[in-house]
Amino acid sequence: MADFRKSVVYQIYPKSFYDTNGDGLGDLKGVTAKLDYIKELGADYIWMTPFFVSPQKDNGYDVEDYYNIDPRYGTMEDFEELAAEASKRGIKLMLDMVFNHTSDRNQWFQKALAGDEKYKNFYIWKKGKGPGVPPTNWESKFGGNAWQYVEKFDEYYLHLFDVSQPDLNWDNEEVREEVRKVVRFWMSKGVKGFRFDVVNLISKGDFEDDFEGDGRRFYTDGPNIHKYLQELNRETFGTDAEFVTVGEMSSTSMENCYRYASEDGKELSMVFSFHHLKVDFMGNEKWVLVPYDFQKLKDILFSWQKGMAEHHAWNAVFWCNHDQPRVVSRFGSEGKYWKESAKMLGTVIHCLRGTPYIYQGEELGMTNPGFTDISQYRDVESKNHFRILQEKGLTEQDAYRILQVHSRDNSRTPMQWDGGANGGFTTGEPWMEVTKNSSYINAQAELADEDSVFHYYRKLVQLRKDYDVVAYGDFEALAERHPQVFAYRRTYGGEELLVVNNFYGRETVWESGLDTAGFEKLLGNYEGGCPADGKFELRPFETMVLYRKK
Ligand code: GLC
Ligand code: CA
């Protein structure tokens, strides 16, 4: 069995990774060109966000044709070359499957609009509650009502995301069969894993108005979700024991994740959950400015670590992806302690129980770009909310302040390869501006510096391979109420790992009460060893990984 517990996944957002033909957009050849870089980092899998034919309203999460490569990214030959070159290096590919919805340009939806009943049933249509009144008051995740009126049918279709992303009707067996066909097609191309986009939204429940929230309780972790995932597993990837799958679980519950990611392997290998990344929201509202809640962050991560282990289920562990701001800007520091904080944050994730994911540029400590004008933004969600925030009465300046913190574009700026023009990402005009600090935060500079964030991440990846306790150990939370310290212990057979982190840019002391005799320091971001007396005097953003074997 593929040991995904010993593995690390590197996520690529192809559009912003590396451009080989000067059109300003990253491409598949660009991924092939940088495989040695990923190999050097030590990642086992590459998860690539969608590069299928798409109008790119949501950067490829609006799929027009599941079987072909968008010409912006290259050709099927480019893909095959990438797969072959990756395989030569022992790197496996994980593709991103978007099956909650399609693009409105997808032929299924086009046929539906043309009145073909078979394909109309591929989507979710309902009558309005009255003239101009949609079937329910549910909100789209990208802003506005989640239903779009189509005059021809005097009906609305559901779109939980953009109006150009109609939701598929999974209760229709023909839809599920089409989905299986797509999955089998990419399996036959030699990919070894899938990430399933917002997959816990595919089974819709009752279509009722939500007077408590935005509607999500009616379609999240819905009535047939486990049945549909088990069916997909049985009929497709479940036949290959080597296959690794991860489900993106939107606003999920831990109880459902015990089943999604159970080690019995009936559904998925692991899950992404996001509760720990809502600690700078107000409830579910992300478009606000509130300081992050450190205690809440710890409580959530600790409870998921414990709960998933107790129920024999497996986590994906991560800070960053293409929907999240850069973690060093979010929980670390862009200033004096930039490097220390980037290393500390990486340590917290990589020593947890779960499979770590590194999002392109995270291993360099890339930051949010700090865009100051709406013309610099590309993301549909950001643009919608920039407008909605001002409609709610916020000033333009306040709307910008919120975007600078929460926009998904914060992580989508081009990868910083070197200190030259456009960070070495393209010789043309980049589709999105490169962050100014590419002069010193870039791969070339960091590869040459043993003390860089890159080499630190490389060592973190290696730890998981060298020490079974990192991959398989039990988890125990420590210092649960300490206002600055994030600490935990892992144990496996006679092996013991202590991971101690100061989450803040000021010194702190932690009287752990632990017997720390005989611990050796495997990794850290400052000089010095393990205190012999259990008293940790931690410097700004200090991290240390301590190891002892009985
Ligand atoms: C997921 C993707 C995000 C996309 C959305 C709709 O959350 O990660 O980028 O916009 O699904 O497909
Ligand atoms: Ca290109």
Image: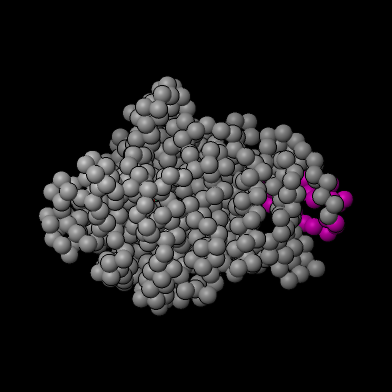
Instruction: Locate residue 276, reporting x and y percent.
Output: 57, 48
Query: What residue is shown at x 55% (from left), y 59% (from top)?
Result: 254
Q: Is residue 211 visible?
A: yes
The residue closer to the viewer here, 290 or 128, is: 128
Residue 219 included in the magenta stretch of the image: no
Q: Is residue 21 above or below residue 477?
A: above
Instruction: Locate residue 376, reporting x and y percent.
Output: 36, 30
The residue closer to the viewer here, 17 or 99, is: 99
Query: What residue is shown at x 43% (from left), y 56% (from top)?
Result: 220
Left or right of residue 519: residue 227: left
Residue 468 sits in quarter: bottom right
Q: Is residue 448 visible?
A: no
Instruction: Locate residue 117, reporting x and y percent.
Output: 15, 62
> How is the structure coloured here?
one colour
Span of residues in magenta: 515-535
Residue sitting farthest toward the right? 533
The residue closer to the viewer here, 376 or 108, is: 108
Left or right of residue 176: residue 258: right
Query: What residue is shown at x 34% (from left), y 57% (from top)?
Result: 100
Query: What residue is shown at x 29% (from left), y 51% (from top)?
Result: 158
Residue sitting farthest toward the front? 130
Q: Is residue 185 above or below residue 212?
A: below
Residue 377 sits in quarter: top left
The residue closer to the viewer here, 251 or 294, is: 251
- Tally of numbered tags: 0
Left or right of residue 360: residue 59: left
Magenta: main secondary structure? loop
Residue 540 sits in quarter: top right
User: Which quarter of the rendered picture does the C terminus lie within?
Assistant: bottom right
Instruction: Locate residue 25, reporting x and y percent.
Output: 31, 43
